[in-house]
Amino acid sequence: MMSQMPQQAAPAKCPSCAEPLESGDLFCGACGYDLSAVPAAPQDHPTLTMGAAGVGSSGVDWPPPEPESSGTPAAPHLPTDLPGTDSGGTSLPVSPPPHGSPVSPASGVRFDRPPEPDEYPLQAPDPRVAASAAETAESAGTADTAELPKVCVACRAGRVDDDGYCENCGHAQPRERDHMEQESGPVAAVSDRGLRHHRNEDAFAVGHTTLPDGTPAALAVVCDGVSSATRPDEASMAASRAAIEALLAALPQGTHPQAALHDAIVAASQAVNALAEEPPSAREHTPHQNAPACTIVASIVASGLLVVGWVGDSRVYWVPVDRGAPAARLTEDDSWAAQMVAAGLMSEAEAYADERAHAITGWLGADAYEVEPHTASFKPDRPGVVVVCTDGLWNYAETAEEMAEIVPADADERPLHAARVLVGHALDGGGHDNVTVALLPFPEPPQGAGSA
C-alpha cells in the first residue's frame, strides 16, 4: 500500500485564478496551480499606523480611538471634528456636530446640513464699502480716484480687471465710447452704441466760448463714421475734435460764426484725410478697404444767430419753446434720396422708402469728392432749442413735426436730460444704429430779429 503524505487543507478558491475548489484537490482544475504550496496567511500590518491621542507623524492632532463595543458601530470621525488652518496658517476652531445629528451607521454620512447664511460673501469687495471708504478718504483730503477700482456695471460687486471683464461675474464691461455724455455751459450731448452695432462709430464735441464783445457762444459738432470704410470710429473722433478746436480758436478772435464753421469743417476733413496717410505696408493686407470716412454736422448759437454747417446726412432741427410755432429742419441731406427729391424724380416719402435712401453722396475722407461744406445762418424770432443729431435718432423722428413731439418741453432748461430722453426714444424704437444728439438752447432773441 502506498503511504500517503499528510495533505494541507485546500482553500475554497484557487489563489491564482479564484476558481472554486473541491475538498481534497491538489491542483486547480482551471489553471493547474499547486495547492499544496499555499503559504500561511500573513499577519495584518497596515501601512498607515493609527496612533493614540497625540500628534502623529502627519502633524495632525487626531482624536483618540473610540472604545470598542460589541453591538454599536463606532461613531465616524468627520472633517469638522479635526482642527485645521486656513490659507494664511491661522488655526480654525473645531465645531462639534449639533446634538442629535442624524448619521448613517453604515456609511458614516451625516444627513443634516448647516443653516444657509442670509448673504454669501462676495468674491470681490462690496462697492458700498468701497464707496464709503472713498467718501472717508475724500473728506480727509487723501482721495486718489485714479487708484479706486472700477466696479462691474452688471453685478455691481466685482472689480473690473485690466482686460475689461468683471472678476466676480465675468461680464464684459462697456467700452468708454459705448455711451458718452457731456455738458459744456448751456450745451449737452449724449451718444450711445445702440442695440445692434458692436461698437459706437459716432462722436461728438461740445463747447462754449466768448466773442470779442463779451457775448457767449455755444457750439456742438456731431460726426457719424461711415461703416463701409475702415476705422470709421477713428474718423468721427478725429473730425469732431478738429472742428471744435478750430471753432474755439476762431470765434474769440472775431471770425464770423458762419465763416468759422466753414473753416472748421475743412479742418475736420483734413484731420480725417490724415488718417489715410499710413505706410504702404500697413495696407498690404487690406488693399481694397476704403479710407477712413465720416459725416459731420455742427451748429453755433451766438449773438442772436443760429449757424449750421454739414457734409453728409446728419441733421439739425429747430424746435421752438412755444410748440404752437412750427418746427423746422435746417439741413439737406447729402444722400441718394435727397438727390432724387431735388431732381423731382421721386416724392420724399418714395425716396426715403427706397433701400438706397441712406446711400450718402457727401462725406469727409481721402476717398471723398472735393469737400465743399454747406453752411447757413438763421435768426429765429423766439426762444427754442437746436437739435443736432445723426440718423440714428432722426430715423425714428424724421420730420420736423415728429422731432418736436419727442423733444421734452423743458429741453431749453435741461438739455442733458432732454438729450437722454431722445437717445432713449431711439433705443426704444429698436436702436438699429449708433445714436448721437446734441442740444443747444437758443435764448430769447433781441427785439427786431428775423425769423427762421
Image (cartoon, helix red, strand yellow):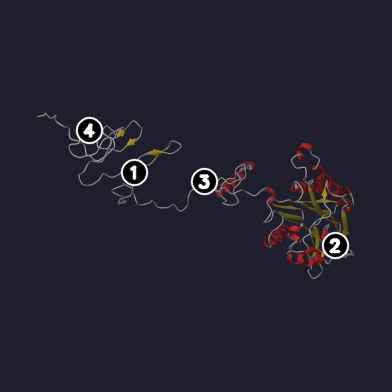
Q: Which mark is residue 35?
A: 4
Residue in view at x 14 percent, y 30 percent: 6
Cα separation, mark 4 vs mark 3, equals: 65 Å
| Earlier-in-chain disc, 3 versus 2 | 3
Work out whether 81 lies above or below 197.
Answer: above
Residue 66 in which image quadrant: top left
> Furthest-front residue in view?
1
Q: Residues within 10 Å of mark 3 (few under 14, many from 20)?
A: few
| Earlier-in-chain disc, 1 versus 4 | 4
The mark lying in front, picked from 3 and 1, is: 1
> Furthest-left residue in view?
1
| Earlier-in-chain disc, 4 versus 3 | 4
Question: For this rendering, which residue is in front, 52 or 418?
Answer: 52
User: Which residue is identified by label 2?
Assistant: 340
Cα separation, mark 3 vs mark 1, equals: 28 Å
Residue in view at x 76 percent, y 66 percent: 402
Q: Amino acid at mark 3?
A: Gln
User: Which residue is identified by label 1?
Assistant: 78
Where is residue 94 drawn, in percent x and y?
36, 42
Q: Amino acid at mark 1?
A: Leu
Q: Is residue 259 visible?
A: yes
Work out whether 53 lies above or below 206.
Answer: above
| Earlier-in-chain disc, 3 versus 1 | 1
| Earlier-in-chain disc, 2 versus 1 | 1
SS class, disc 4: helix
Q: Amino acid at mark 4?
A: Leu
Of the 4 image quadrants, the one containing the C terminus is bottom right
Where is residue 227 drawn, in percent x and y?
75, 51
How many numbered callouts? 4
User: Which residue is identified by label 3?
Assistant: 123
SS class, disc 3: loop
Q: Residues within 10 Å of mark 2 (few under 14, many from 20)?
A: some
